[in-house]
Amino acid sequence: MNTQYRENLPGSDLDYYNAPAAVDAIQAGAWAKLPYTSRVLAEQLVRRCEPDKLTAALEQLIYRKRDLDFPWYPARVVCHDILGQTALVDLAGLRDAIAEAGGDPAKVNPVVPTQLIVDHSLAVEHAGFDPEAFDKNRAIEDRRNEDRFHFIEWTKTAFKNVDVIPAGNGIMHQINLEKMSPVIQARDGVAFPDTCVGTDSHTPHVDALGVIAIGVGGLEAETVMLGRPSMMRLPDIVGVRLTGKRQPGITATDIVLALTEFLRQERVVGAYVEFFGEGADSLTIGDRATISNMCPEYGATASMFYIDQQTTDYLKLTGREPEQVALVEQYAKTLGLWSDALTTAEYERVLEFDLSTVERNLAGPSNPHRRLPTSALAERGIADEAKWESGKTEEAQGLMPDGAVIIAAITSCTNTSNPRNVVAAGLVAKKANELGLVRKPWVKTSFAPGSKVARLYLEESGLLPELEKLGFGIVGYACTTCNGMSGALDPKIQQEIIDRDLYATAVLSGNRNFDGRIHPYAKQAFLASPPLVVAYAIAGTVRFDIEQDVLGRDQNGQPVTLKDLWPSDEEIDAIVASSVKPEQFKQVYIPMFDLGAIEEAESPLYDWRSMSTYIRRPPYWEGALAGERTMTGMRPLAILPDNITTDHLSPSNAIMMDSAAGEYLHKMGLPEEDFNSYATHRGDHLTAQRATFANPKLFNEMVLNDDGSVKQGSLARVEPEGQVMRMWEAIETYMNRKQPLIIIAGADYGQGSSRDWAAKGVRLAGVEAIAAEGFERIHRTNLIGMGVLPLEFKPGTTRKTLELDGTETYDVVGTPAPRAELTLVINRQNGERVEVPMTCRLDSDEEVTVYEAGGVLQRFAQDFLEGKV
């Protein structure tokens, strides 16, 4: 740390860095105009930047300039077990490579404190109407993931600065919010703002506390772990003034779904969004966290709220020590991070959103930003009276109706970190039970809170038995259905869906509902608040008008509608006030974080299990990755439409027997019931490679039906033969030929989860470049981290204007440099040559050096062996 501007923090025995003085020394009064994000970034520059570079870096913030990269050093890295484990597998493989080159592998360690929480590997094999569901699901999780958990346990002893929270304890974002983030750090006698990166796109959940926390891919997280700064330019910082007050009966979920639609329309993609105004002041931290969590759904990088009385009240509620709460308030007020000090902040763009306009909402059927007001179900064609009436007839015959809700899940830290939402669900269940309503028998129900605290306050309030009675017993403390881990269906239900080609759906309180994500047999999915999830479990179909139609009849034969079940705000708030207590958080988190002494591993090198399909030494110094990228004669692996998600690129849901990965696992001797999910196998590249473009909802425009329409499925066309085959077979064919590949795509390529295998899979297939109309931020950095060149079409140029059909070969001409113009040369089958100017989406000098080295790990290995780190 530098000593310039280091002073004593008033009322404390800690020091701090007087960033306001440093900024105002450059331009008097500038600090008062800086947004919250700029103030936090300025503080870390004053604390960490080399003195001779400080002025130029601060000028980027003061004058809103964007012509210079400056370093950002996050204070922590948080990981879930899928990407966190994958990152540590990479580091274990890096140790092997260092050892083989004569270096000391034990010196390869995360430099930045790294917290890994096992939360992504539990599947809901046993539903919430089974009283033993939690124990059964955990037993299955341990059995299926024995190889993974063995490796994760080894990392605790082998790597310095790695803490592990084992399975069964909660979701990383909720634990981050309720415990891990101190809001203000105190290290080596210095106080400074907590910041972090996390290997999940929903890491901004904790932005609700005023903590800059952003989602990154596993590869970028590895960069930060190894002590390198995350180089950045000043982001667009958009102010969002929240006005008005929500209407009675409106949940935070309704608000965030409306905000997601609004902010998508306002194009905040890549921006840091800062919420302020009287509307923001009225929101609880639980409400704010619901909004911040869905940051990637509206495309922003961060979703900040200021530190205020709500923040400190929440820290007290969640059992933080009084000294820490006092430090947060004192530091925030001294540095100007308290809400009162930000009334003079200036933004380049300010949006306004009126909370009083929000109505009850769903999102769907395929995208989280596709808001679906419950008042508009009929006009959108979701609720359908004729199909509902027909469904009643089918139900009477013992069949499922069209639009059957086969999965209803209260899940995801988006909603379960908000006690108001969970209590509201409990009250709906209580009233439904009192009136004699039950869930439909084909609905697989589950409740997976992100924290064990939820059980304690639901038991305190008497609402847990009510949820259990309706089928929403606790199945785990993990991501479950939100991450596609919804588990197997009843075989009879699954077979009926197949035999009748039934339009089956899922309703969940999660944050993602892309086609094919929640379950292979749920054709579409809808996001909803927890109390609405309970209502849809009773309805059993989406063909039902949830606001108007009769859910059922009470014991006296009287009709019951949603309004008869919906609790008042006063009921909800009274239970939250009386039942959510600081001692509950202490009861859960004190033993969870009492890690005790940890023995050091016998060897710094991992003893790889040769037959494992979960953990395998990574191949990043072998095969295609060890050779030169030719950037010539590339053939297209796929030509893709707009809005390709990382779920298309590398799905995370259950592995089917008839998939390439399923066939491989079968050959490896795994029983089908233990295939697990694609996500859990990402530590083994031989399994994970077979997930590349394995989503059955993929549309590869190179593969057409007889009528010229694009055929749906995990398919590719191998050229020059023109032979259509399954995507994995096409990849294998090209790998055997050592054929360099390219992918052509539309807008918003790579949106969705921060999934490094979405980049690893295509690179291992031999893809050297991707030409798209636009890239999602995290996926673009992952591509660079794997040595794949992202190229962006100029406005007005697309795969369609160029009339590409996949028979072409492609060359890239020019030297990659930040935002340089390169040329994509298209060599058509008829001999025509077309030169297309492209923007090189290596956006900084640091990204260029990583790309030139072949990727993050290759760059670090070079520097390590040359003594630069």
Image (cartoon, rainbow, N blue to C red):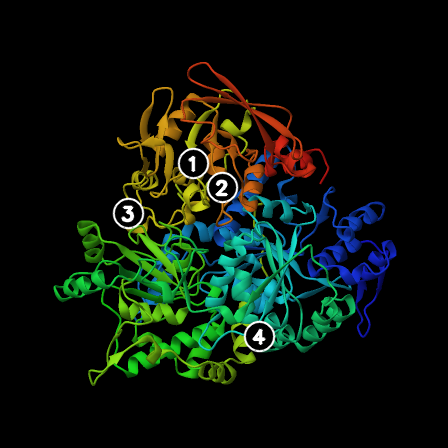
Give the amino acid type for the residue marked by disc 4 in the picture: Thr
Give the amino acid type for the residue marked by disc 3 in the picture: Pro
The residue that mark 2 highlights is: 749
Q: Which is more N-terminal, label 1 or label 2?
A: 1
The quarter of the displayed image where residue 156 is located: bottom right
Q: What's the distance in space between the residues labelled 1 and 4, CA to CA?
A: 46 Å
Q: How many other residues sit within 10 Å of disc 2, few (<14), some (14-19) or many (≥20)? A: many
Q: Residue furthest left?
A: 397
Asked whether the beta carbons under mark 3 and mark 1 sit within 8 Å of each other, the answer is no
The residue that mark 1 highlights is: 640
Q: How many other residues sit within 10 Å of disc 1, few (<14), some (14-19) or many (≥20)? A: many
Asked whether the beta carbons under mark 2 and mark 1 sit within 8 Å of each other, the answer is yes
Q: What's the distance in space between the residues labelled 4 and 2, CA to CA?
A: 39 Å
Image-based side of 154 in relation to 688, left or right: right
How many numbered marks have been drawn onto this rendered protein structure? 4
Give the amino acid type for the residue marked by disc 1 in the picture: Leu
Q: What's the distance in space between the residues labelled 3 and 1, CA to CA?
A: 34 Å
Q: Which is more N-terminal, label 4 or label 1?
A: 4
Helix, strand or loop at mark 4: loop
Q: Which is more N-terminal, label 3 or label 2?
A: 3
Residue 519: image tag: none
Quadrant housing the N terminus:
bottom right
Q: What's the distance in space between the residues labelled 2 and 3, CA to CA?
A: 35 Å
Residue depth check, mark 4 versus mark 3: number of the one nearer the observer: 4
Helix, strand or loop at mark 1: loop
Residue 6 makes an appearance in the image:
yes
